Amino acid sequence: MTPDYHRPGALDEATALLAAAPRVVLAGGTDLYPATKAQSLGGSVLDLNGIPALKRIEITDAGWRFGALVTWTDILRADLPSAFDGLKLAAREVGSVQIQNAGTLAGNLCNASPAADGVPPLLTLDAQVEIASAQGIRAIALSAFLLGPRKTALAPDEIVSAILIPATAGQGVSDFLKLGARKYLVISIAMVATRLVIDNGCITAAAIAVGSCSATAQRLPGLEAALIGQRPATLAIDAILIAPALNPIDDVRGSAAYRLDAAVELVKRSIERTCA
């Protein structure tokens, strides 16, 4: 049966439709379609692809705004400072080129997989999620938006409208490392994103996040604090500052113990790469 299909041209039209009745929200569709066992999407579909405003990357006085329909390819092609290099490296790891062309940054977050490639680099960029409904706009930290595997803070009548990066997070250089059973087209065993600000030969700010080793990706505040004031040439990275923040599981991709060891090694390598 053909679903009840809606393709609004503006965000307020979309939120009004969602307030009127429950609907399946469609962006890139790269997670939604594989999860659909039927030949077509069931129920009422709300397609966001007719809203041009959601496809833009904008720079404002407050920072950067990535519309909900910005794709991984858009991110790779965007003129962004070195602080976003980790996000660009993650973009290259998201499936195939075809998936990167269609899949969206916001969809990666709404899917809420513990292995979502975009989450660790966005956490190091202090990302906020802009959420729209018929009642208005709100923004919450990405760490508060992700509640667990396949769980987010979105209410049934809400849509992610943008990802916001504050201007202060545009400083420094960044990196992303991912461990999988093969190089490409794989769900990660562990992954790490790093952003460091180095001034006069010392680390003055640090943001480190680990994914695939907890119910949601986690920042490592203890390690971040310990890095402040250190010189890249004489870095001392203590594993005890990494492991307590993580809670990996055993699954077909690796044991919890292996994931933990891998995460510690990836953190060390990523910090060294960023310093270099």
Image: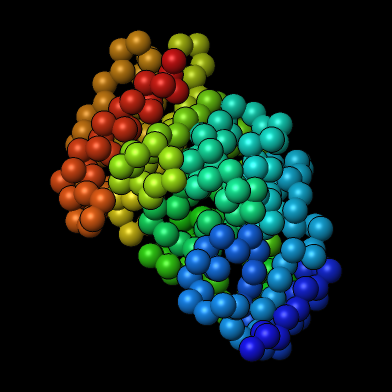
Residue 185 lies, with reference to residue 155, above or below; the image says: above
Coloration of the structure image: rainbow
Residue at 63%, 60% in the rendered image: 28
- Looking at the picture, tell me which residue is in the foreground, 36 or 141: 36
Q: In this image, 221 relative to 254: left or right? A: right
- Residue for point 60% across, 48% down: 98
Q: Nearer the viewer, residue 103 or 137?
A: 103
237 w.r.t. 118: above or below: above
Front-lying residue, 161 or 180: 180
Q: Residue 32 at x, y = what percent?
A: 54, 68
Q: Which quarter of the rendering shows the N terminus? A: bottom right
Camera-side residue of 37 and 112:
37
Percent across and percent down for residue 55 are 75, 53
Image side of residue 124 versus residue 11, left or right: left
Task: Determine the residue positioned at 23% across, 55% down.
Answer: 252
Residue 254 locus on image (x, y percent) = 22, 49
